[in-house]
Amino acid sequence: LARAGLNVCAMASRYGNNDSTLAVEKVCVDLGAVIKHLKTVLSYAKVVLVGWSGGGGLAALYQSLAEHPPEDCRTPSGEEVALKDLPPADGVALLAAHAGRARIFSEWIDPAVTNEDDPGADRDPTVDIFSPTAPKPPFSAEFVARYRSAQRARVRRITAWVKDRLQQLEHEASEAGSDWRRCRRDATFMVPCTQADIARLDTTIDPSDRSEDTLETLAQENHSPVGLARFTTLRSWLSQWSLDDSRADAVSALRRVSVPVLVLANSADHLVPPAHAREMYAAITHSRKQLHTVKGATHYYLGQRRELKEAVETCRSWLCAEGLLPLAQPREGATSSSEIATLSLEDLQVFTAPRLATRLDLRGVNHLALVSSDMARTTRFVCEKLGMPLVKTIELAGGAGQHFFF
């Protein structure tokens, strides 16, 4: 998107690419701070939330909270979070996105685990796809239903244990007095075997153009030391992974979103089920929505320049159609490229101060060439927002324009 000429701002939350203690409600606060900065400091008129892969549930949740501030501003574990004054975005684009972490997790987790401390012991043979006696794909509808039900049951057993453990910690803290060892507010734990989605073995389940994985590949992922939700805390589990407690579910959130929404799916995506895109699209109650599937595209577009180009062009055409791309609709009063006004020395004098209120800490020399239909506005942005003073201008012969040096 950035290489196609769109202004893209990628943000990192307070958790620094470590989701083991993450609370989605707090990430929404961080996202709100970025949107506010883009609009009030950098003067962007339109901001569109783009949720890719796992960001889909977060983007949908954020917009629903911004449009409809909740009465209960707490995380599922009871922590107060400032969710009342989140600035809404002007559009939402969900790209190769699943509907939410808790939802996708309930479709990936290994349902055969009955002992969380020893996942190899006492496995449920009726849903153990890694057993030598397990059925082979394509799986029967009865087996798929039993498998999915057992997955949800395991998630809920863990959630029940998490809530009991939190209550225990809170009780210990209330009686701890000055004993810091008993004043813990949270605790870490490990969730083994979380990579066992049978749809990766059987492409007749929610059919698409994806390729089948081997049982050996899935087994290596499932029993490895790393994986989805492998390391987490009690409070983070309830916010991110609990099927009945996590807020970050796009299907639920999109019912309360009024801005334009683009749902873009990849037909050969082996990680995101096509049903998620259909359900998210169906959940949107207004008509300013678009569902587009990129034929043959995988999750990461590796080696797929044509498919990636189609995805980018779909985003751009949607932005233009919804009036979300400033270049698609000239600003009121803006000059055309053939009517570029020349700025006088008086106009430019204010920008020549050796020290401006805002100033970048420049560590090198860079050359950036810009062609603008509104150089006055561009100059204000470079000087006032980026803090780079104007040092020289050159009038081009024949009234062809001006060169500016900052």
Image: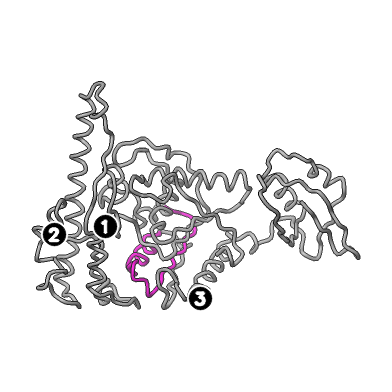
Quick check: is 215 in the magenta stretch?
no
Q: Residues within 10 Å of mark 3 (few under 14, many from 20)?
A: few
In this image, 332 relative to 113: left or right? Answer: right
Considering the numbered disc 1 on the image, is that residue within a helix, a strand or a loop?
loop
Amino acid type assigned to the residue bearing label 2 in the image: Gly
Residue assigned mark 2 = 120
Considering the numbered disc 2 on the image, is that residue within a helix, a strand or a loop?
loop
Q: For the residues marked 2 and 3, what is the alpha-carbon distance in whole angstroms?
A: 43 Å
Amino acid type assigned to the residue bearing label 3 in the image: Arg
In the image, residue 103 lies at what x, y percent? 29, 58
Looking at the image, is 333 positioned above or below residue 291? above
Q: For the residues marked 1 and 3, what is the alpha-carbon distance in whole angstroms?
A: 34 Å
Residue assigned mark 3 = 305
Quadrant of the image occupied by residue 205: bottom left
Q: For the residues marked 1 and 2, what is the alpha-carbon distance in whole angstroms?
A: 14 Å
| Residue occupying image coordinates x 68% and y 41% | 358
In the drawing, what numbered circle is on residue 225? 1
| Residue occupying image coordinates x 27% and y 33% | 184
Which residues, given as a range, are shown in magenta?
257-284
